[in-house]
Structure formats: structure tokens, C-alpha cells
């Protein structure tokens, strides 16, 4: 039980004096309590124990004031550098045989390519042409490309069953031909697979001679060495195979000369010849 407070009935002065003394006692207890808390340390806003230090009242233990949580410092982005291309020892040896500053005649270039040959397989000879504008066309190489060209014919009017099967194969992604030839009346049906054939360069086109009323005759030309060519969609560049190293200088020279005659020379910026695994040689235009 607490203390019994005795009041004198009717003595207002005595009652007032008692209330004042009680208020003083409560104030004194509050001051002592606050002093005890400051000495023992009270958790701050950040949950760190605080104490009186030389840095000031309420500073965290260790002498530093609590700070706002700092965001994690971002690691500096490492600049990506292109990986250095590693060439095979055979390629390095072949590169020693060419002069980068020279423009070779076709005869000289083929001689150098023959010296560069160091592989065990029959390399393909390629032409790479930079043009000033878009170019497309076709040409029959006198000695072919050395590769068997698979030709498919889409002619519903002549072979409805075969055309329907070919269309289903294309839709299913079964494409086992290098050239597709279509009759003019068949183009409407091929429209629904244009998104499949187009990116592969297989969509029949009148400009390349693959849309014709005589598909069988055109198919024989392709099998005999006809080559379609056109600049790439995003760059004025033509890449084309013109034979095999096993053809020899005479046949390769005939094929390349025939191809270059089919290309508008006024649109040729520069041209190069190379084998599959060899460095390229710049040719005189």
C-alpha cells in the first residue's frame, strides 16, 4: 500500500502546500530517471547504442554519428573489348604470300591462290564484290560451280499433287533444294510461305529468272551452272562461288571472267577473290 495522505478539512493553505510538495517530488524523480538513461545509453533512431562521448551527447559508440543508410556503390562497368581473332598457323603462312597494298590481275591472283592451298579438301573459290548501288541478275558459268545444284519446281497447273506436297514441306521447314522455280500462276499460292523462303533467298523472282512459263528448261540451266546474284539487303555486297580449286587456273579464269561480264562494271567499287580458307586478294577492276 502507498502512503496515506492526510488532509486537514477546511485548511486550504495546508492542502495547497501538500500538492506543491508532491509535484516537486515527481519532477525530481523524472530528472533522476533521465540522467540514468543518458548514462546507460538508449537506442537511437538507427538502433545503435548511444553514449556521452567527446563528439557530443547522443553520439553512437565508436565516436561517429549515425548516418542515413547508404546505397550500394555501383561497380564501374568494364568496357567490353573485341576479342582478338586468332588465325591458324596455316592461314598465317598463307597471308605471308600476299601483298595487301597490291591490286592483282586475275591471272596473278589465281597463281597466288594455288600457292596458298594448304587444306586437305577441295576449297571453293569465291568472289566478293563491293558495289556502288543495288545489283542483281543471273549468269551461266561455263564450267559450273563444282557443286550439284538441287532445283525444285512449283507448278500446280502441271503437277498439282507434287506442288501441294512441296508447299506442305516448305511450311514444315523441310527445304532440301538450292533453287525454287515457279510458274507465274503459282506465285499467289507461294505468297503464304514468302516469310520462310524470302530470308533464305529462295523466293522465286522474275528478275532472277526463277519465275517462268518453262520451268523445266530453266531448271536444266541451273543444274548446268547458272548462278543468281544480288547485293545483300543491308549492304551493297555480292558474295558468290565461282568454282573449286581443283578446276585449275584455266577453268577458274573462264568462270570468273564470265561472271564479271554479267555484273555492271560501272557499279563495281572493289572486288576480291579468295578460297575457302585463304586470305582475300584484291583484283584490278
Image (tube, rainbow, N blue to C red):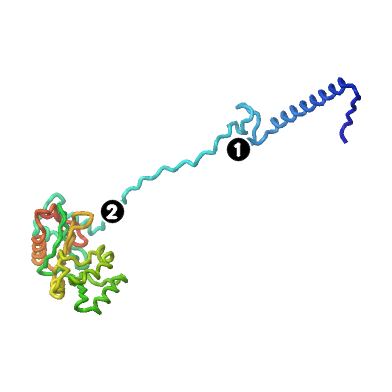
Say which residue appears at 16% left-offset and 55% top-offset: 134
Q: Is residue 73 left or right of residue 98?
A: right
Secondary structure under tag 1 reads loop
- In the image, farthest residue toward the right: 9
Residue 56: horizontal and vertical position, in percent? Answer: 62, 27
Q: Is residue 4 left or right of residue 127?
A: right
Q: Quadrant of residue 79?
A: top left
Residues 145 and 139: in front is 139
Which quadrant is the N terminus positioned in?
A: top right
Marks 1 and 2 in Cβ contact (< 8 Å): no
- In the image, farthest residue toward the top: 13
Q: Which residue is mark 2?
A: 85
Residue 176: horizontal and vertical position, in percent? Answer: 26, 72
Circle 1 crowding by C-alpha within 10 Å: few under 14, some 14–19, many from 20: few
Residues 166 and 8: in front is 8
Q: Quadrant of residue 272?
A: bottom left
Q: Which residue is mark 1?
A: 46
Is residue 156 in view from this perspective?
Answer: yes
Q: CA distance from mark 1 to mark 2?
A: 55 Å
- 1 or 2: tag closer to the N-terminus: 1
Say which residue appears at 21% left-offset and 73% top-offset: 154
Circle 2 crowding by C-alpha within 10 Å: few under 14, some 14–19, many from 20: few
Q: Quadrant of residue 137?
A: bottom left
Amino acid at each position: 500500500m502507498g502512503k496515506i495522505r492526510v488532509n486537514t478539512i477546511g485548511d486550504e493553505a495546508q492542502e495547497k502546500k501538500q500538492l506543491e510538495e508532491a509535484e516537486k517530488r515527481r519532477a525530481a524523480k523524472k530528472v533522476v530517471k533521465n540522467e540514468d538513461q543518458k548514462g546507460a545509453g538508449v537506442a537511437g533512431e538507427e538502433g545503435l547504442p548511444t553514449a556521452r562521448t567527446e563528439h557530443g551527447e547522443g553520439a553512437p559508440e565508436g565516436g561517429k554519428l549515425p548516418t542515413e543508410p547508404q546505397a550500394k556503390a555501383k561497380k564501374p562497368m568494364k568496357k567490353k573489348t573485341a576479342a582478338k581473332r586468332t588465325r591458324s598457323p596455316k592461314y598465317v603462312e598463307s597471308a605471308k604470300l600476299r601483298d595487301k597494298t597490291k591490286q592483282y590481275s586475275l591471272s596473278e591472283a589465281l597463281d597466288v591462290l594455288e600457292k596458298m592451298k594448304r587444306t586437305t579438301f577441295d576449297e571453293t573459290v569465291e568472289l566478293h564484290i563491293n558495289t556502288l548501288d543495288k545489283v542483281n541478275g543471273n549468269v551461266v558459268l561455263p564450267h559450273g560451280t563444282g557443286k550439284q545444284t538441287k532445283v525444285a519446281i512449283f507448278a500446280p497447273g502441271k503437277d498439282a499433287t507434287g506442288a501441294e506436297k512441296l508447299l506442305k514441306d516448305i511450311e514444315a521447314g523441310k527445304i532440301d533444294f538450292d533453287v525454287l522455280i515457279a510458274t507465274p500462276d503459282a506465285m499467289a499460292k507461294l505468297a503464304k510461305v514468302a516469310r520462310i523462303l524470302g530470308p533464305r533467298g529462295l523466293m522465286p523472282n522474275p528478275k532472277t529468272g526463277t519465275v517462268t512459263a518453262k520451268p523445266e528448261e530453266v531448271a536444266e540451266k541451273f543444274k548446268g551452272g547458272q548462278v543468281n546474284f544480288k547485293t545483300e539487303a543491308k549492304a551493297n555486297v555480292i558474295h558468290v562461288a565461282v568454282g573449286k580449286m581443283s578446276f585449275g587456273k584455266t577453268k577458274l579464269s573462264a568462270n570468273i571472267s564470265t561472271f564479271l561480264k554479267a555484273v555492271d562494271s560501272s557499279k563495281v567499287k572493289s572486288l576480291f577473290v579468295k578460297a575457302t580458307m585463304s586470305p582475300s586478294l584484291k583484283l584490278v577492276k
